[in-house]
Image (cartoon, rainbow, N blue to C red):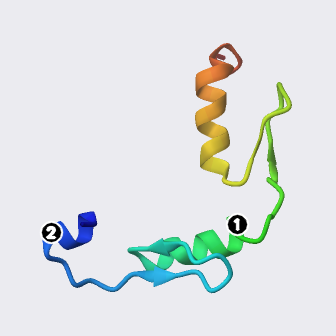
Amino acid sequence: MSKQERRGSTSRLYSCHDCGKQYRWKSTLNRHQLVECGGKEPLHQCSWCSYRAKQRGNLAVHIRKHHPEKLTK
């Protein structure tokens, strides 16, 4: 039984036409299709190492975790 079935929810899930992933929110599906789906290359490059991210927020988390000394002024 899925989490959705356990809650008794009948909310609509939005599915990606290319890969079939499902999302609760249409905005999340739109972000997935624009940024992630179809083997798109990561656009955001870390300035201090070879890490690359598809989303700017994920790069920010990486920098705070792996390069905190670079953020001090």
Compared across the picture, whether 27 is left or right of 18 comes to left
Question: Mark 2 to mark 1: distance in Å?
Answer: 30 Å
Disc on res. 52 = none
The residue located at (59%, 23%) in the rendering is: 65
The residue located at (67%, 41%) in the rendering is: 59
What residue is pinned by disc 2? 7
The residue located at (69%, 64%) in the rendering is: 36
What x and y, as percent, mark residue 64? 59, 26
Give the camera-side residue of 43 and 22. Answer: 22
Relative vertical location of residue 40 with respect to residue 20 in this rendering, above or below: above
The kind of residue on which mark 1 rests is Val
Compared across the picture, whether 70 is left or right of 61 comes to right
Compared across the picture, whether 2 is left or right of 18 comes to left
How many residues crowd around disc 1 within 10 Å: few (fewer than 14), some, or many (20 or more)? some
What x and y, as percent, mark residue 52? 79, 42
Give the camera-side residue of 71 and 41. Answer: 41
The kind of residue on which mark 2 rests is Arg
Tag 1's secondary structure?
A: helix
What x and y, as percent, mark residue 60? 63, 38
Disc on res. 35 = 1
The quarter holding residue 30 reads: bottom right
